[in-house]
Amino acid sequence: MKISEKKQHALYEEMARLEINESDLEEQFVLGSGSGGQKIQKTHSCVVLKHIPTSIEVKCQKTRSREENRFFARRLLCEKIAHLRGEKTQKDLQAEKIRKQKKRKKRRAQTKSEE
């Protein structure tokens, strides 16, 4: 699976918005671990990305592809830096949506039990 140009462009725009430069990143490729057998444990497809100014370190091993893991690590780093700056990330919005749904279900259950 190749990352589309549109997604890569969106990632680089997000990095520019958060003022993350490629020169500020320290990237390492380490041996993978976990399930997946020989293919994971013999290749250096796990990406460790460190943002030097903030000392935030991200480790990504979502797929067996090094290029995809580089993309996902950068996206994860953007999320962490945005969260550090107090901005709402996609995960925050999703968690808020779930909290509202649970609250609504709880209210409905209470009104039904009162009747």
Image: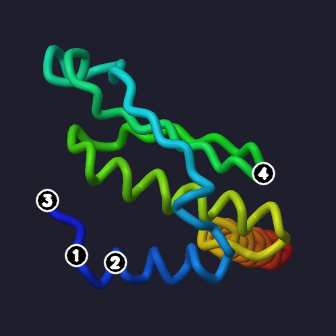
Q: CA distance from mark 4 to mark 3?
A: 31 Å
Q: Disc 3 to disc 2, how far (Cα)?
A: 13 Å
Which residue is labeled 3 in the image?
1
Task: Say what amino acid the circle numbered 3 marks.
Answer: Met
| Residue count near mark 3 (Cα–Cα under 10 Å), binned few <14, some 14–19, many ≥20 | few
Q: Amino acid at mark 2?
A: Lys
The C terminus, quarter of image: bottom right
Front-most of residues 63 and 71: 71
Q: Is residue 54 left or right of residue 16?
A: right
The residue carrying pointer 1 sits among few (fewer than 14), some (14 to 19) or many (20 or more) residues within 10 Å by Cα, namely few
In the current view of this chain or complex, which residue is farthest to the front?
23
Query: Reading the chain from its start, which is encountered first: label 4 or label 1?
Result: 1
Residue 16 x %, y %: 59, 79
In terms of secondary structure, where does tag 4 sit?
A: loop
Residue 47 x/y as whole percent: 41, 38
Could you say whether the residue bearing mark 2 is in a helix, strand or loop?
helix
Give amino acid for label 4: Thr
- The circle drawn on residue 54 is 4
| Nearest to N terminus: mark 3 or mark 2 | 3
Measured along the vertical axis of the image, is residue 68 above or below residue 45? below
Give the label on residue 7, or none: 2
For the residues labelled 2 and 4, the Cα–Cα distance comes to 25 Å
Rendering quarter of residue 76: bottom right
Q: CB of mark 2 within 8 Å of CB of mark 1?
A: yes
Q: Position of residue 86 (x, y in %)?
A: 84, 71
Q: State which mark lies toward you, 4 or 3.
A: 4
Estimate how packed mark 4 is, as few (under 14), some (14 to 19) or many (20 or more) residues with alpha carbons within 10 Å. few
Using a 10 Å C-alpha cutoff, classify the residue at mark 2 as few (fewer than 14 neighbours), some (14 to 19) or many (20 or more).
few
